[in-house]
Image (spheres, rainbow, N blue to C red):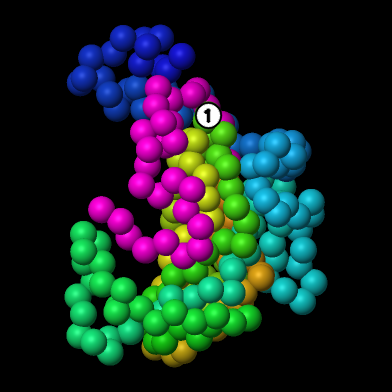
Amino acid sequence: MSISRQFPFTTSAKPLVMCVTLLFMSIQPDWWIREQSKRGMIEPFEEGLVRDGVISYGLSSFGYDLRAAPEWHIFVNAFNTVVDPKAFDPDSLVATEGDHCIIPPNSFVLTRSVEYLRIPDNVMVVALGKSSYARCGIVANVTPLEPGWEGHVTLELSNTTPLPAKVYANEGIVQLLFFEGPRPDITYAERKGKYQGQTGVTLPKL
C-alpha cells in the first residue's frame, strides 16, 4: 500500500508525502544485491569487485558498478543538424564499435551497459558516474532506473575538457545505488514506459 493511501494527505501536503516516503526508503547492501541478482536483477552478474588493471566493476559494499559495452554513438557536427529530443536526427551521431572510444573535446557519447537489468517493483535505482572518470573531466549523467523497468542502460558521457578523452569498453562506467521502499501504485512496466525492454544504445523517444 502506498504512503498516500495510508495517510490521506491533501494536495498542498505533497512535499510532506515525499519526505515521509524517503524515510521509508533505504539503500541496500551487497548481500541484498547478490540475492536479487540470483533472481535475474543483473545479468551477467559479477560476485565481487574486479579492479586489477581495469576501471573497477562488479559488486561493492553498497552498490554495483556496470560495464560499458563496446558500442559507441559519438555526437558530431558534420551535417549541421539540431539536437532535438522531440525529433532526434540520427545524423547527429556516428556509430562505432571497439574496446575504447575517444570522445572529442567538449563533446558527448552514448553507450550502453553490458548488463541487462530487471528492477524490482519496489526498488528505485540511481546510476552515478565513477570518480576515476570524473577526475579526468568525463562526466556520466545521473540516471534513475524506475521500479519495474528492465533493459540495457543507455549511458550518456560528457567530455568536459578541451582535450580528447578515452573511455574503455568492458570496464566500469557507472555505479548503481539501490533504494528499496513501498511499492508504487503504478510501476514503469505497468504504465508501459517508452524505454521498457530496451536493448543496445537507445536514442531519445517521444
Relative to 18, residue 146 above or below: below
In the rendered image, residue 58 lying in the magenta stretch gets the answer no
Residue 155 visible: no
Residue located at (50% from left, 23% from top): 182
Q: In which quarter of the image is residue 13?
A: top left
Q: Main secondary structure of the magenta part?
A: loop
Q: Would you call the spot at circle 1 few (<14 residues within 10 Å), some (14-19), or many (20 or more)?
A: some
Q: Which amino acid does label 1 sit on?
A: Asn
For the record, the magenta segment spans: 178-206
Q: Quadrant of residue 162?
A: bottom left
Find residue 57 and report its horizontal and vertical position in percent: 69, 62
User: With 60 as the anchor, is 196 left or right in this view?
Assistant: left
> Percent from the top left, x then y, of residue 40?
67, 41
Q: How many labels does the image show?
A: 1
Residue 179 falls inside the magenta stretch: yes
Q: Is residue 14 left or right of residue 129?
A: left
Task: State whether residue 57 is above or below residue 80.
Answer: above
Name the spot of residue 187 as percent of width and height, x first: 43, 31
The residue that mark 1 highlights is 122
Residue under the point 72% across and 47% down = 61
**Residue shown at 21% from the left, 64% from the top:** 87
For mark 1, give the secondary structure.
loop
Is residue 92 left or right of 162 when viewed as pictured?
Answer: left
Is 191 drawn above or below residue 17 in the view shown? below
Residue 50 locus on image (x, y percent): 77, 63
Compared to residue 38, the image places residue 88 above or below, namely below
